[in-house]
Amino acid sequence: MSRYYRDMAHTSGKVHVVRVSKTGYMDKQGRRKDYTSAYLRRTYRDGGKVKNETVANLSALPDHVIDLIDAGLKGQQLVPAGLAVTITRSLPHGHVAAVHAMARELGMPALLGPAGRARDLALALIISRVVQPGSKLSTLTWWSDVTLGADLGVADASTDDIYAAMDWLEDRQDAIEAELARRHLAPEPNPARMALFDLSSSWLEGTRCPLAARGYSRDGRKGTLQIEYGLLTDPAGRPVAVRVFPGNTGDPAAFTAIVDVIRDKFGLQKMVMVGDRGMITSARIGALNQLEDGTQRPDPYGWITALRAPAIKKLMTDDGPLQLSLFDQQDLAEITSPDYPGERLIACRNPVLAADRARKREDLLAATDKLLAPVIARVQAGKLTGAGEIGVEAGKVISRYKTGKHFKVTITDDSLTVERRQAQIEEEAALDGFYVLRTPIPASQLDSPAVVTAYKNLKYVERDFRHIKSDDLDLRPVFHRLEERVRAHVLICMLACYLTWHLRRAWAPLTFTDQDPPEQDSPVAPALFRALLDHLGTLTRNQVRFAGAPATVPMLTEPTSTQRQAFDLIGVPIPLTLK
């Protein structure tokens, strides 16, 4: 073959990348070294034989450049890195996915009612209250900014749709709560047949709601219109039912209402109701198990409550059953009194609480003395005269710390004398740290420590109120005007609290709420429930378009170890979509 044709053959041969590894090479110092070389070679035929020709030595190039040359020679389409993948949309996903997963684990969609748009909207409102509490209008806008709106099909909802869903949910309240009562208050899941109940309040914006009234504000907002709402829970504080009352409703009236609900709507018999001293009064106890004709019910309810300070003081009189000597060797004693026939009285003394109350009382008295000193000085200097004027100024000071009962104040037109009622202070101090529980439950059914524990479990209801009001769910203030919308709003918050109760329990290892939290992999891992939800929100779902492909593909960002553990604790894998 002529040289011309040999050159043509070389030129027309295929070019490819060859990597050659050399191992075991010994340098001059006797050190073993391994080498890898890369060459650009052309393959061609010469006289029927396949031969190779090295076109270039690529060994000096970076490995990734050699890989690109190799891929291009093999026919792959290469594009600039910035054009290979395009993320067309990115939405926060992890937080709503976790809460929705817990809702599904608890059977909440079926609990709310039959499938349909109203149920999807109601479920979205409950999940939103856990993840991003806010007004209904802000919630509506937020749905389009997270995967919740698209996955539940509510991103295009209107305010009218939301209000219709709230009305639908409020109509379902009795059925929802009856199912929760079957799950958590029935004899099988709740052998003690015990329920906790307490009352709280939240103020309203506006004046036209029929439930709005002025009453005792547990939010410290005196003079504002408010509603009252009572929360019923199981012994562990798991929310079961909620009832909304006018803002001037007292604790005893609310207690009677919830007992009627438990008996008549839930069909639960022989329950033990636990309430604070202002709720289960003697009058309510008398009517608790009485039928309309005056006879006693065949299935009486038990109860556990506490005595007020005057009743405790009466038990501590010289010949009373409650003597300090009972607590020389113990902090708990069971006594009886003819004033409480058929009842057990469990007296308790908390020395830590006693010391704290004594310190607080002395601090308030000292603060009052300090504020009174300038007023007394003004009177003595003749700068403040007249019994009326002096009384007004002294009253302002004494009422500031609510210590008036501990001071004897003598006022004339030109004098002001203030002295402590030391005997009365010492008499009150004798009650420091004491509380007395009363119950008709026999000791064979519930011993004294169990009675104390049951009453102290009211702290769980208080915790739920904190979560509902501000910590997690931000119930207050209430902006709705219609009575049914207010009830629906409170019901949504209660169901969100039910979800939160289970999430907090599942995520205890991550939020440091269990007794023995495990060691954390990272010192900056989220340590609070709200912080954990925020961290889960950084797990996004992205719509990805690859070069040359017309359609987009949904993909999740790589989860952090904390995000993976959060879903593991719920017992579900991280879902790509909510449905």
Image: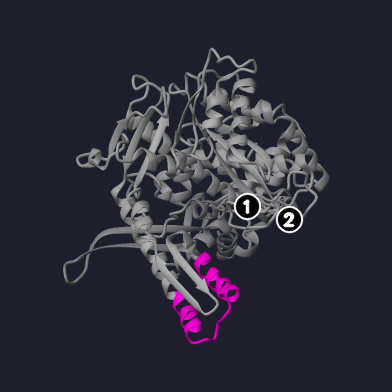
- Secondary-structure class at tag 2: loop
Q: In the rendered image, which quarter is residue 22 located in?
A: bottom left
Q: Residues within 10 Å of mark 2 (few under 14, many from 20)?
A: some
Q: Amino acid at mark 2?
A: Glu
Q: Residue at x 65, y 31 (%)?
A: 109
x and y percent of residue 379 in the render?
50, 81
The residue sitting at the left extreme is 30
x and y percent of residue 545 in the render?
67, 53
Q: Is residue 435 left or right of residue 71?
A: left
**Residue to which mark 2 is pinned:** 205
Q: Amino acid at mark 1?
A: Gln
Question: In this picture, which residue range is highlighted in magenta?
Answer: 371-400
Is residue 13 visible in the rendered image? The answer is no
| Of residues 426 and 270, the one drawn nearer to the viewer in this rendering | 426
**Residue to which mark 1 is pinned:** 132
Say which of marks 1 and 2 sits in front: 2
Q: Is residue 301 left or right of residue 79?
A: left
Q: Is residue 251 left or right of residue 361?
A: right
